[in-house]
Image (cartoon, rainbow, N blue to C red):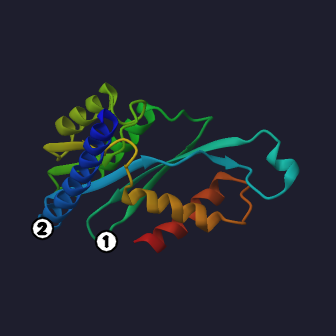
Amino acid sequence: MQLQSDYDQHINMKIQCQNAKATDKKEAAAKSNVAIATFDLQSVLQITCSQVSPLYYSRKLNMFNFTIYSLKPPNDAVCYCWTELDGKRGSSEVGTCILKWLSNLPESVDEVVLYSDTCSGQNRNRHIAAVLLFAVQTTNVKVIHQKFLEHGHSYMEVDSMHASIEFARKNVPVYSPHEWQNFQKCSQEKTV
């Protein structure tokens, strides 16, 4: 009985989170001063990536892609990429990407709503909170709402961008970071 009650509560939270996102999306569409976006780090992209068996077992360079997907038309996405030589995939790197995105928003935007999953190492921690506070103090943005979707049910629009990148790469070998970036450009044209 307790298991069923916990499950029902979990599903109710999922529905509430998705409804809140839909409401925020609708309200943001009506206001020109509000930006709304989802963000996430894509699974590790490997270089080289090919169907050749010996390459599968060789040492690969890992590349990371952090994507911020705007939920207002024209629904554009921004991909921030780096390799494991340039950094890891923790809150410092995620915070840097978010700050760069917030700094590049139009001057008319003074309120931002951000949705993400509940990954504590990347999104839900004091470092990201500090970056958002810094952004409020140093950019035109005056209010930032950071919202998290229910654990295990965090499908976001940004995931469609990641799926599009993976689909564009399907059966095509990748030998350099620039090739991954070409797939991202092609994917942005399809998802927009």
SS category of the residue bearing label 2: helix
- Classify 121 as above or below 136: above
> How many numbered marks appear?
2
Q: Residues within 10 Å of mark 1 (few under 14, many from 20)?
A: few
Instruction: Find the residue positioned furthest to the front.
Output: 1
In the rendered image, which quarter contains the N terminus? top left
**Quick one: 167 or 6, which is closer to the camera?**
6
Amino acid of disc 2: Ala
Q: Earlier in the sequence, mark 1 or mark 2?
A: 2
**Quick one: 158 or 85, which is closer to the camera?**
158
In the figure, residue 32 lies in which quadrant? bottom left
Pinpoint residue 106: horizontal percent, then vertical percent. Answer: 23, 58
In the rendered image, which quarter contains the C terminus? bottom left
In the figure, residue 7 lies in which quadrant? top left
Residue 140, which numbered label?
none
- Classify 100 as above or below 172: above
**Residue name at image x 14 percent, y 44 percent:** 143
SS category of the residue bearing label 1: loop
Pinpoint residue 188: horizontal percent, then vertical percent. Answer: 47, 67
**Residue name at image x 30 percent, y 25 percent:** 126
- Classify 112 as above or below 30: above
In this image, 173 relative to 93: left or right?
Answer: right
The residue at which mark 1 appears reads as 74
The residue at which mark 2 appears reads as 30
In the figure, residue 84 lies in which quadrant? top right
Pinpoint residue 78: horizontal percent, then vertical percent. Answer: 41, 57
Question: Does the rendering let one see residue 108?
Answer: no
